[in-house]
Amino acid sequence: MKERLQALRAEALDKLQQVKDANNLNELRVKFLGKKGALTEVLRGMGGLSAEERPMIGQVANEVRGAIEEFIEQKQEAFQREETERRLQEETIDVTLPGRTLAQGAVHPLNKVVEQIEDIFVGMGYTVAEGPEVERDYYNFEALNLPKDHPARDMQDSFYITEDILMRTQTSPVQIRTMEAMKGDVPVKIICPGRVYRRDDDDATHSFMFHQIEGLVIDKNIRMSDLKGTLLQFAREMFGPHMQIRLRPSFFPFTEPSVEVDVTCMKCGGSGCRICKHTGWIEILGAGMVHPRVLEMGGYDPEVYSGFAFGMGVERIAMLKYGVDDIRHFYTNDMRFLKQFARM
């Protein structure tokens, strides 16, 4: 048995000497030292030895096991060093190479305009109010003096989900919800930014979805002159200190009297050009004094309180401010277009 153990040792060391990778090394370890390995097979014959032979054979077996394990360990360390060297060579970083510039994002131009408008009105003491985009017919129309048979509803030709639920066509419902929440308290001084939806054909100036910001002020002794002064201040902060505004009579069911608001043409400064159709003015929003019926629906006595409201399309303001000629540019995610606004 001693000779068999010594022969096993010689065979194992010879084969281990020739091994080329860690996988083969593990296979040889199992072959010679595993539970069903060659060394175990030899040791099973110790039961037939005399009491005097067993200690000697046991010592030889331990020496053989130790020699094989030591050689395997040396081989493992050698393979690990080789792997480390290989990875160091493959993963070498040349610190003299220039760094890779990471693409930096920027705020979308529409969001920039929304933030600027919010900053202007917050600076005048307004708070920002929000409401649901999926709205009840009552808040979107009826509470705004637009009963179910009112012809002005046709102009908005809305997206209805049920007979009573629709995608809001304006942010005016937020005004009614705020008035209800205030329960007759004053002052009410809010702006309502958000997305609105109308069935429309997409073209250079129209979209089925766009952004709107509306404003509402309610208190005692609110006059048309307050509305005009507010909008003049907004126009000058938004487009420049030289701006003037012009109010033209108009009609909106939820305001009386109602006006369309024009500003001095940004292109020609009011002298007349192709952009303003040689009038010197460009329309930017609609406004007016809150209709008494709307005040009543919101819980305010029109004999005691008055107010004004206004609404503007964010895309229109952005197009005028940045000279954009097609509303669709804001939604097509063309990086050539969007990069122009990264540092504005």
Image (spheres, rainbow, N blue to C red):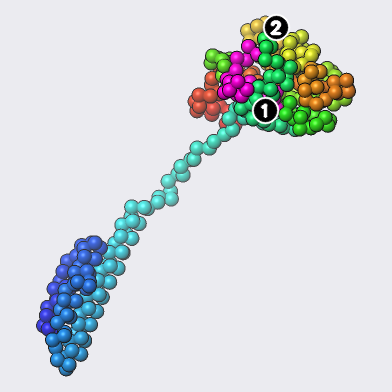
At x 60% / y 14%, what residue is drawn?
A: 157
Q: Using the numbered discs, state the Cα–Cα distance from disc 2 to disc 1 in whole angstroms.
A: 30 Å
Q: Which of 297 and 61 is in front in this view?
A: 297
The kind of secondary structure element at disc 2 is loop
Image quarter of residue 110: top right
- Residue beneath the point at 88% across and 20% down: 303
* Residue placed under numbered mark 1 in the picture: 193
Q: Residue at x 88, y 23 (%)?
A: 304
Residue 213's disc is none
Which residue is the site of mark 2? 279
Q: Quadrant of the C terminus?
A: top right
Comparing 125 with 84, the one in front is: 125
Query: In which quadrant will I find the N terminus?
Result: bottom left
Residue lying at the far bottom of the rendered structure: 52
Secondary structure of residue under mark 1 = strand
**Looking at the picture, how far across and down is residue 163, in whole percent?**
60, 20
Number of disc labels: 2
Q: Give the range drawn in magenta.
A: 153-174
User: Local crowd at mark 1 within 10 Å, few (<14), some, or many (≥20)?
Assistant: many
Report whether residue 198 is seen. no
**In the rendered image, the vertical position of residue 202 relative to residue 3, given as above or below:** above
Report the amino acid beneath label 1. Pro
* In the depicted structure, whether residue 31 falls above or below residue 213: below
Q: Residue 301, how many percent across, how many down? A: 85, 23
Label 2 amino acid?
Thr
* Of marks 2 and 1, the one in the foreground: 1
10 Å neighbourhood of mark 2: few (<14), some, or many (≥20)?
A: some
Q: Is residue 121 magenta?
A: no
Q: Which residue is drawn at 57% across and 23% down?
A: 161
> 176 or 236: nearer the eye?
176
